[in-house]
Image (spheres, rainbow, N blue to C red):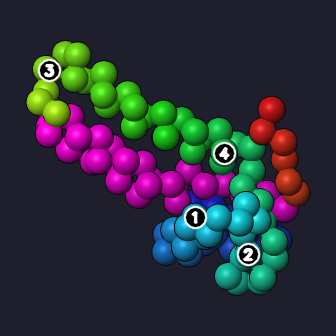
Amino acid sequence: MPTCQSCQTTWSYKEAMKAMWTLDPVKTCPHCGARQHISKKGRQRSILVTLFVPLVLLGNIFFDWSVGTAFLWLALAAVLSILLTPYTMDLSSEEEPLF
Ligand SMILES: [Zn+2]
């Protein structure tokens, strides 16, 4: 779960989810109002979780799913990666370059 680097408060699942949906890369802490950035570590983790989604399509090679079944698994993987995002989110007070 993300922890505010300004007030050291750990955000709840709901708060992290809400922050995730704002397109602004700068998240505002709901506890102290400090501007928080997604840390390099957090971004790398979210990329890994996102990569998991197309990996599901590889299952199609082994199980020979129909288009409907493949789509269902893809949708399930996408929902799962969204639901897991609050757990992978990591905050930083400073903006960190990804590379
Ligand atoms: Zn805070």
Q: CA distance from mark 3 to mark 4?
A: 32 Å
Residue 33 x %, y %:
78, 82
Would residue 12 be seen by someone viewing this image from the given angle?
A: no
Q: Are marks 4 and 1 in contact (CB under 8 Å)?
A: no
Q: Are marks 2 and 1 in contact (CB under 8 Å)?
A: no
Q: CA distance from mark 2 to mark 3?
A: 44 Å
Indicate which disc, 1 or 3, sits on the residue closer to the N terminus: 1
Q: Amino acid at mark 1?
A: Met
**Which residue bears the numbered disc 3?**
63
Q: Which mark is residue 28?
A: 2
Q: Amino acid at mark 4?
A: Arg
Is residue 16 shown left or right of residue 90? left
User: Is residue 67 found inside the magenta-colored segment of the image?
Assistant: no
Residue 32 x %, y %:
77, 83
Q: Amino acid at mark 3?
A: Phe
Q: Main secondary structure of the magenta part?
A: helix
Q: CA distance from mark 4 to mark 1?
A: 12 Å
Would residue 75 be seen by someone viewing this image from the given angle?
A: yes
Q: Secondary structure at mark 1?
A: helix
| The residue at label 1 has a CB less than 8 Å from ligand 1 | no
Relative height, residue 94 to residue 44 (above, below) = below
Range drawn in magenta: 68-93
Indicate which disc, 4 or 1, sits on the residue closer to the N terminus: 1
Indicate which disc, 2 or 3, sits on the residue closer to the N terminus: 2
**Which residue bears the numbered disc 4?**
43
Q: Residue at x 72, y 55 (%)?
A: 38
Relative height, residue 67 to residue 38 (above, below) = above
Residue lying farthest to the front in this orientation: 67
Q: Amino acid at mark 2?
A: Thr
Q: Residue at x 23, y 40 (%)?
A: 71
Q: Which quadrant of the rendered structure holds the C terminus?
A: top right
**Which residue bears the numbered disc 1?**
20
